[in-house]
Amino acid sequence: MIPEQSASPVLHQLLVIGLVMVASLYVGSWVKRVKLPSLIGYMFVGVLAGPYVFNGIDNGLLTHLDFIVEVGLGLVAFTIGAVLSVASFKKTGRGLASIILGETIIAFLVIALCVYLFFDNLPLALLLGAIGAASAPAGTVAIIQDYQAKGPLTNTLYAVVGFDDGLSVVIYGFALVFAKSMLLQTNGHAGYSVLTQLWLPFQEILLSILVGVIAGYLFLALVKKLRKEGDVLVLSSALVMTLVGVSEQWHLSLVLTNMVAGMVLVNSGREGVISRVRQATSMIMPLVFILFFALAGAHLDISALSVVGVGGVVYIISRCIGKAGGAWIGGTLGGADPKIAKSIGLAILSQAGLAIGLALIVQKEMAQIAQVYDLPSAAEIGATVLTTITATTVIFEIIGPILTRHVLIKAGEIRDR
């Protein structure tokens, strides 16, 4: 018998993770029977196991497991890229680009305007608008794969949630620069270089694309020499982990780097190679989704809902209007299929890791400005942004996947089972 003092904390952590995975599997299956997406069940288990309820997964363990969420998001991005062929772009063409531009830019404008009218604070409005323009690709892809959705709306969704991330990063970069500039200039500080800062979001996007292209071609050269499906899975996983690590080290977009690598595969590889990579990665996706959404649920503080307030309601309503209305306007102007333009906005409302990550950056930047330039108002803006995004993420992560499933069923691209 092992003495209690010698029991390894690692064993306790593995026990908790194992129990969460088993519970997520069965709760997800039960939730699906009552016509809800499985990932809602995974998140529910994560919320219960997380630090804000039973504390099985405490904050320390949650921090140590954050890399799983990042790798999962990278694999989702690679999966998105691996279906974005040039042929699929030719079918949707200008309509796809218009939908992406519409649902991000118009969402940004609508959220920023509504928040400004409510709070009378332009820096705050710009920051919440920029963060609200981003969608969460993992939830959408999980629904598509869980229900094996196929069709033109599904193909468009893959592209929209992928490129949405890149455009949102650019918008966010601009918004943060102008928000900081307004705060400093209003309070008599003129030493802030706007032009230098404006280059940073473009630099992030361009470097992300470059790294993704290089990694994609190296991966393609290696994977076509492999014969065993297990080896293909190992190499694919290694690619995603490497790109996530490079993105973290160089402050790149892990979604864009992995998505571009997947696009290189699908547009430059032979059909046999592409099929083998897709088949190999599909084997690990159920495990990735369970871990990803259970840990995402553990991050959600349900008590944050109590502080949503009227400002949070304004943000939620304006984001829904901006996303749905922007996709419809963009799709209509771009000549997209009217059915897709009308419905796709409701399928991209999920808000998760990227939004919270950007909100944390805002909170850190604003706290630094408050300290260096003695501007308490900057710290207040950062706290408001983080509180609003954290609280509304709980809501969007519940309604987002449900609406995605509803839209795909209505489009006839998944069976209502």
Image (cartoon, rainbow, N blue to C red):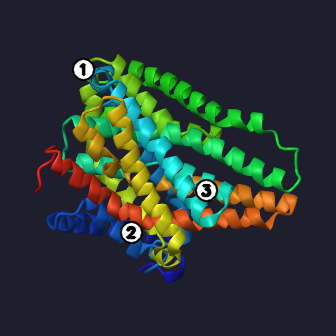
Cα–Cα gap, marks 1 and 2: 38 Å
Q: Secondary structure at mark 3?
A: helix
Residue where numbered disc 2 is placed: 46
Residue 110 place in picture, x, y as percent: 50, 51
Q: Is residue 21 above or below residue 246?
A: below
Residue under the point 85% across and 57% down: 187
Residue 176 place in picture, x, y as percent: 67, 48
Cα–Cα gap, marks 2 and 3: 32 Å
Amino acid bearing label 1? Glu
Residue 3 place in picture, x, y as percent: 49, 81
Of the numbered discs 2 and 3, the one sitting upstream in the chain is: 2
Question: Which is more foreground, mark 1 or mark 3?
Answer: 3
Residue under the point 68% across and 63% down: 381
Q: Secondary structure at mark 1?
A: helix
Amino acid bearing label 2? Gly
Please indicate whether residue 410 sits to the left or right of residue 316 in the image: left
Please indicate whether residue 116 sits to the left or right of residue 156 in the image: right
Of the numbered discs 1 and 2, the one sitting upstream in the chain is: 2
Residue where numbered disc 3 is placed: 125
Quarter of the image that includes the C terminus? bottom left
Cα–Cα gap, marks 1 and 3: 47 Å
Residue 374, by quadrant, is bottom right
Tag shown at residue 163: none
Q: From this viewpoint, is residue 235 visible?
A: no
Residue under the point 24% across and 69% down: 27
Residue where numbered disc 1 is placed: 271
Count of numbered tags: 3
- Which sits in the foreground, 141 or 103? 103
- Which sits in the foreground, 58 or 95? 95
- Which sits in the foreground, 404 or 377? 377
Q: Is residue 409 above or below residue 300?
A: above
